[in-house]
Amino acid sequence: MKKRYSEEQVVRILAEVDGGQSVAETCRKYGVSEQTVYRWKARHGSMTVEEVRDMRQLIQENSQLRRIVAQQAMDIDALKGLLSKKWQALPSARPRLCCLRRSSNIRRGERAKWRGYREARFGAFTG
């Protein structure tokens, strides 16, 4: 369902109701039910247009931060899963760049993450 009124318009309608106009008259004027006006009043109260804009911006920032934290938590869990497995060193021509392999198969994504970490730390293996 499409919103009919923006939050700024809702604040202005509530200002009319607070200014002395009856709720029924305001509802007829804007084509909304009385329950809608009371719901708006419970949500927005006596906020100004600037406060509503600030609140909307804070809500957007909060949701973006929640996505970032969720992604970091998933990365941490993946790394903990990798580090908790038993690893064995494979013989290599360059011992300081030995590859680590788990005794069973590793998912492709985890292997790529470990390879990227190793290359970032020790340099790309070109041998």
Image (cartoon, helix red, strand yellow):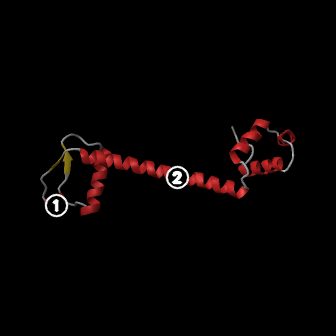
Relative to 94, say whether 82 is above or below: above
| Disc 2 versus disc 1: nearer the observer | 2
Tag count in the figure?
Answer: 2
Task: Report the residue at 70% width, 48% height from top.
Answer: 44
Point out which mark residue 96 bears: 1
Residue occupying image coordinates x 46% and y 52%:
68
Give the residue type that dot 2 points to: Gln
For the residues labelled 2 and 1, say whether their Cβ atoms are less than 8 Å apart.
Answer: no
The relative height of residue 33 versus residue 113 in the rendered view (above or below) is above
Give the label on residue 125, or none: none
Q: Residues within 10 Å of mark 1 (few under 14, many from 20)?
A: few
* Residue 18 visible to an observer of this rendering: yes
Image location of residue 56, percent across then percent down: 63, 52
Instruction: Give SS at disc 2.
Output: helix
Which quadrant of the structure image shows residue 36?
Answer: top right
Provide residue 125's location: percent of width, then percent of height.
Answer: 22, 60
**Mark 2 lies on residue:** 64
Left or right: 3, with 29 as reference point = left
Residue 23 pos. (x, y %): 83, 41
Report, in whole angstroms, how far the alpha carbon at label 2 lies from the one at label 1.
40 Å
Q: Nearer the viewer, residue 124 or 50?
A: 50
Pick the front one: 105 or 35: 35
The answer to whether residue 94 shows anywhere in this view is: no
Amino acid type assigned to the residue bearing label 1 in the image? Arg
Q: On the rendered structure, is 105 left or right of 37?
A: left
Q: Say which quadrant the N terminus sits in.
A: top right
Left or right: residue 7 compared with residue 59: right
Circle 1 SS class: helix
Please name the residue shown 16% across and 61% down the image: 96
Q: Please identify the quadrant where the C terminus is shown.
A: bottom left
* Marked residue nearer the N-terminal end (2 or 1): 2
Depth check: give the residue in front, 125 or 101.
Answer: 101
